[in-house]
Amino acid sequence: WSADWARFRAIADSVGAYLFADIAHVAGMVVAGAYPSPIGHAHIVTTTTHKSLNGPRGAVIITADYALARKIDRAVFPGEQGGPHINTIAALALTFKLAQTKRFSVLQHQVIKNCETLTKRLEERGFAIAFGGTDTHLMNLDCRSITGPDGTTLSGDMAARILDLAGIVVNRNTIPGDRSALDPSGIRMGTSWITQRGFSEKETITLADIIADVLMATTPYALKSRKRRNRRAKVDFKTMEEAKLRVCALAESAGIDFDPTVHGYPHFYYMGDEPPGKGPRAAFDIGGERVREFLNTAVSSDVEALDHDQSQATRISTPQGEIEGTLTCKSPSEFQLSVKSSEANLAAAWLRALSDGFVSINEDDLLAKPPGPAWVRESNEPPAKSTKGDPVGNEKPFYIGISEGSGKPLPGFTWEEPTEPGELKRTTLHAIHLELGAKMAPFAGWDMPLWYSSVREEHQAVRTAAGLFDVSHMGIYQAEGPDAAVFLDSVCGNDIGYLKIGQSVYTHFLDPDANVIDDLIVYRRGEEEYLIVVNASNDDKDWAHLCAVRDGEVLVDQKRPWARAFGRNVVLRNLRDPVEGKDMLVDIALQGPSSRDILLALKCDDVTYKRIQKLDRAELCEAMLGGVDLVVSRTGYTGEKMAFELFVHPYKATVLWKALLDIGGPMGLKPIGLGARDSLRIEAGLPLYGHEMGGELTLGVGEAGFRSYVKTYKPWFIGRESFLEREAERDSVVVRFRCDVKGIPMVHLGDPVLDKRGLTIGVVTSCAADRMNYLTGQAYIYKKYAEEGTPFFIFQGTPMKADGETRPDLKPGDRIFIPTAATVLRRFPKL
């Protein structure tokens, strides 16, 4: 709405302030008399010259106060600026001359008429207009007029992105009711440029209808993250493609004073474009880093069966019909698709829309979108001939338009731990632990140090200086080859293909029922190399599971029990197996605020030093430190911001351990046992398999509080559908708590949790003393009690009585167990 400059000046005068008016957006209309002028009211007026003034990029500062003018001049021209741009000065002079003409005035008044027309038409189409309307060149559309099946309203961000794909550029904008500029609900549209193009009310109505049609064909939905529900949206493919053609026709009908160039894909492309080639068949090249995953989803055939220069019959299912074609492998990251020329534009438009990620691939599953992006461009090579054969890969677990199919069901994966404990295994650092006087104990089949001095002292060392952990009992694998990420995205819930070289991510192996097989970290070492680190207690099970999935020996999908997971060509290597020779790796963890200083105190070159200095959390690099080859990763299991895991050849582990202790000792570095490792991870809110995941409670990823680490936008991975079903019914979650007083008996796994009325609301999963010597733990409780600050009570080691059962009569001197008061803490502390 127009500003009332006189009222603004009165307010400024009442408090002895200067009135500063910036009219950058409306300067052209001010000059034309179509918008109130601040001249005579404001002490200072500023404007740019490239918006509604329609001039070159520049700016103007105006004041009638001589003293202010001198101060402004000294601030703007301090004597250190560059020379004047004479071409800009000349262009500004021309701009100001044109702004005095009658035609300029007519143009500016038409700008406002067009905006009022746009606003009125969108209101007629059922949209709410933010701020009650407009009398200027700008309007704000309330996108919350569009609501999805789950109650999610359309966001301004999604609306702007989708309209941009249709060829209409708008700005996302916060409107009343929004809580953050990161999640706006409005889009802002101005009519200055379209009016310069010659739009009148007629063309503006056409534009408004295109905008309305696109947005009304959009379905919003929520994608959950750890802290919020992120608004996302999908748009109808047919409506979008028709809108692009309508926008193109509208743009071509408008005035223009030069001959436009044709840019084509990937900038501007339409289903009405001339098909590539002049023969009966046309060809497109499809490529990109994730093209194998993309095509696994987009086409029906078994892409992984193709070797270099091999072809196969394939089929693409689009909302406008099926397209038969031939798929040829040109390289692991590039394929050629050949189809009939009459179907080429539809095929290209659909594949490009899939890559953009805003079209729905399943009306019943808005979350799913193909991995991408992938490029789809006209091929310079002749199209392949039609290929005979079945275009359907019957063993695929998923593709767009998947048919029912049939096959022999595969057995589920089963694992039984050895009933008889074998001889305890020893890490390569075992002798050093004994030399350091460590208290040793069995853990996951290994003889491991529990502590060296005390759990409390070692816990404090990590929080205040640094600690060195022997975690070389952890399982370490490597997935290699063009299908490494494809395979890992099948067996992991997180988005592995999204990783760049030098990044890592926390994730999980799930079974088809979404039970957790293990939690793990995947590190991308190279173009086709992914390091996988799993829990020592699940090492043998995980390796057997991965190999069985790769070899197609076990069930991976309940609806298609004969299907095989994607990525069967992956090469899996167990890097703790001596057969791997020089490539063997084990893990040593260096954690705590002084850990980087200690690590860099080892000898290294300047390049390595800077590389490690620049590592962000969850990033990794290859390095040589102290003469030892390492993979250095800023990851850990203590919650410390500055923490490293060092992957080293087992023959060099002892050298590295001793070197770190020698250099780090004066800096406060101490060796740390499993006792403090557990108390540190509990304090940090991190899970342990068998406690917060899996185990007797069979807790899943969502129950453990790590729902956001399962990327359900991936269209398929083992356990996806079961996970979504499980999440829809889940009523409890793991929380972190602290007992209210010190000096109380230890809390253990399985201890019941009660609310203040005595209702059992959950169970303890882990507990240990924190750095303040309070008992801090984690518990699985009803979600309604999970808010930070909620009080509850814990019965330590005492079985609960059945509901309604009372205690026997008590006499003076009798004792009864009193539950311990505790309070819910934030899930992950700021350490």
Image (spheres, rainbow, N blue to C red):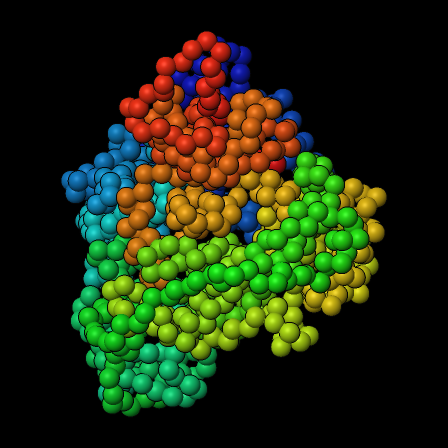
* 630 sits to left or right of 335: right
Relative depth, front residue between 640 and 138: 640
Counting from the top left corner in percent of width and height, residue 9 is at 45, 17
Relative depth, front residue between 340 and 446: 446
In the displayed structure, 604 sits above or below 454; it is below
* 42 sits to left or right of 167: right
Q: In the displayed image of the protein, which residue is found farthest to the left?
A: 124
Location of the C terminus by quadrant is: top right
Relative depth, front residue between 52 and 388: 388
Tell me the residue at 30%/75% (across/down).
395
Tell me the residue at 38%/84% (across/down).
306
Location of the N terminus by quadrant is: top left
Counting from the top left corner in percent of width and height, residue 244 is at 26, 61
> In this view of the protein, can residue 73 be seen by the observer?
no
* 796 sits to left or right of 240: right
> In this view of the protein, can residue 664 be seen by the observer?
yes
Number of dots carrying numbers: 0
* 232 sits to left or right of 753: left
Counting from the top left corner in percent of width and height, residue 384 is at 32, 88
In the displayed structure, 728 sits above or below 6; it is below
Q: Quadrant of residue 63?
A: top right
Tell me the residue at 67%/39% (across/down).
455
